[in-house]
Image: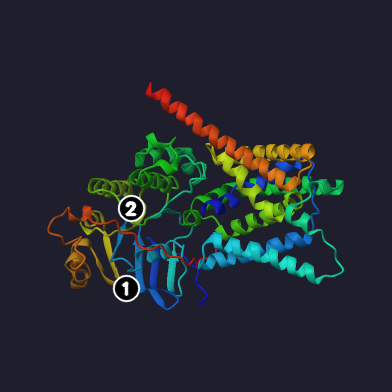
Amino acid sequence: MAPDGLLWRYLGTFRLTWGCSWFLLGIDLNIGVISVCALLAVILIMLRARQRLADDTLLGILAHSSLSLGLVALAFMETVRVDLMSYLFGDILAVTDQDLIWIFVGGAGIVTGLLLLWRPLLMVTIHEDVARADGVRVNLILIAFMLLMAAVIAIAMKIVGILLVTSLLIIPAATARTFARTPEQMAMFAAGIGCLAVAIGMSGSFAWDLPSGPSIVVGAVFLFVLTSIGSAVFLAMQRSAARR
Amino acid sequence: MFRLKKRATPAPDGLLLHGRQLTLRRGQRVLLRDVDVDLAEREVLTLVGPNGAGKSTLLRTLIGLEGYHQGLLLTRPGLRVGYVPQQFAVDRNLPLTVDRLLSLAGGRDSFARRQAVEDAGVGHLLRQAVQDLSGGELRRVLLARALSRKPHVLALDEPAAGLDHNSQTSLYSLIQHLRDRYGFGVLVISHDLHLVMAASDQVVCLGHGRVCCRGEPASVQEHPEYRALFGELGPATAVFPHAHSHAPVLTPVKPRSNVHNG
């Protein structure tokens, strides 16, 4: 898998659901979103099996075509009024108590699923053919993971919006990579960093009346930059200490 | 596209794998045509042939990673395979130590794992990141990983590619030694016949997806078809035995189509 494909597969899941559900975020968890995501996931796996195109390319095509199709469909439904901005960028402040219940229940379910899948999923992530030769049912694992992913995205959509979901899947995991020594650590750290990003984003949003979704992502980027600089400085200091 | 067959029936006595007239196409290309292969217990079977001859495809078909369109493939029930792929690049984003990689391999048999680590000589690498290993180290780690599964069949896809001459020699003698210790059958792909010949029981030479000759190492080397294939390529019949170590590393294209529906 290509780098961001890997991160997609890799721990976005944990962080978003578990991490953020601690933070009062809500979702209009609707079955339609989940089933469309699931359908796309299956299409993705089928296309992947034919392997004419790279994973990233497929993902890009599916993600953007489905987003655009959704917007076009909305335009046809004249009776339905939808706040597009909130779909694209999320509206964390519109979360209801019922959404919160969905988040907690959904989050717990997703984490359980992930724990069950963890070991074979890790094997598949490392090397598909070797996992298959070891007796892992690769396609089954991938489909199960994609379904979990679909659920995560459905939940996260309302919080940060469709356009920013990807960044929350990738950035905290990338940040965690600096510190993590095992895949499990990376998952835990990513979850913590995700929470922190939400806290930063929400405080910024509260203090300066910023749009909440983008603020959260900016918070995540801020942490990423901070740790990148921090680890670079740390390494440089280590090197100069070694020279002395 | 044809529906691909999956193996189901057990192989005859004493055989780990039993393939008859295996045929696999991809698009217009015939990757394998009417290939017969038997792998017995404790046997080292070497697949040789030029690039694109179908060696990797055959190996992958035999261990169930690829399907096949026609023919018959029987395996011993409950067959465990230790697969060492030719390419094994772990994404840098994944923090993974050698120890963790090995722990994912098989059962919870930590004794088997320790034994495998010792046999492959990778004890000093356990705490290293998989991404930081050299080519030779990685090959050994993957071998340890395969061994820890206590496989019935060890499948090695060009284990010597990219290694220098000394490492190749020691790798092959290690494989032979391990075969005696573990008692598995070995499927191995190679470009370099000099090295392989000493260590193999049976050599199958592929050209354009067909078996062009087969038999014990010495007899294959004398075979006119074999000479026709390799005479122009040189590595086996080179006047200077070490000439090949300066040749560019050959990397056959990994089969892209994943026809196995696991």
Q: Dot 1 falls on which chain?
A: B
Residue that carries the numbered disc 2 in the rendered image = B159
Which residue appears at 45% of the width and 47% of the height? B149
Q: Mark 2 vs mark 1: which is more N-terminal?
A: 2
Q: Is residue B176 above or below residue A41?
A: above
Toward the top, the furthest residue is A244
- Whether marks 2 and 1 lie on the same chain: yes
Q: Is residue B200 left or right of residue A48?
A: left
Residue B178: % across, % down: 32, 46
Q: Is residue A120 left or right of residue B156?
A: right
Residue that carries the numbered disc 1 in the rendered image = B208
Using the rendered image of the protein, determine whether residue B162 is visible from the camera's viewpoint.
Answer: yes
Using the rendered image of the protein, determine whether residue B11 is visible from the camera's viewpoint.
Answer: no
Q: Dot 2 falls on which chain?
A: B
Quadrant containing the C terminus of chain B in the rendered view: bottom right
Residue density around tag 2, few if under 14, some if 14–19, many if 20 or more, within 10 Å: many
The answer to whether the residue labelled 2 contacts the one labelled 1, judged by CB atoms less than 8 Å apart, is: no
Q: Is residue B170 above or below residue B192?
A: above
Residue density around tag 1, few if under 14, some if 14–19, many if 20 or more, within 10 Å: some
Q: Nearer the viewer, residue A167 or A126?
A: A167
Name the amino acid type tagged 1: His
Q: Is residue A130 above or below residue A224?
A: below
Toward the left, the furthest residue is B239
Residue A194: % across, % down: 67, 41
| Numbered circle sitting on residue A135 | none
Q: Nearer the viewer, residue A228 or B110?
A: A228
**Residue at disc 2, secondary structure:** loop
Name the amino acid type tagged 2: Pro
The Cα–Cα distance between marks 2 and 1, rounded to whole angstroms, is 22 Å
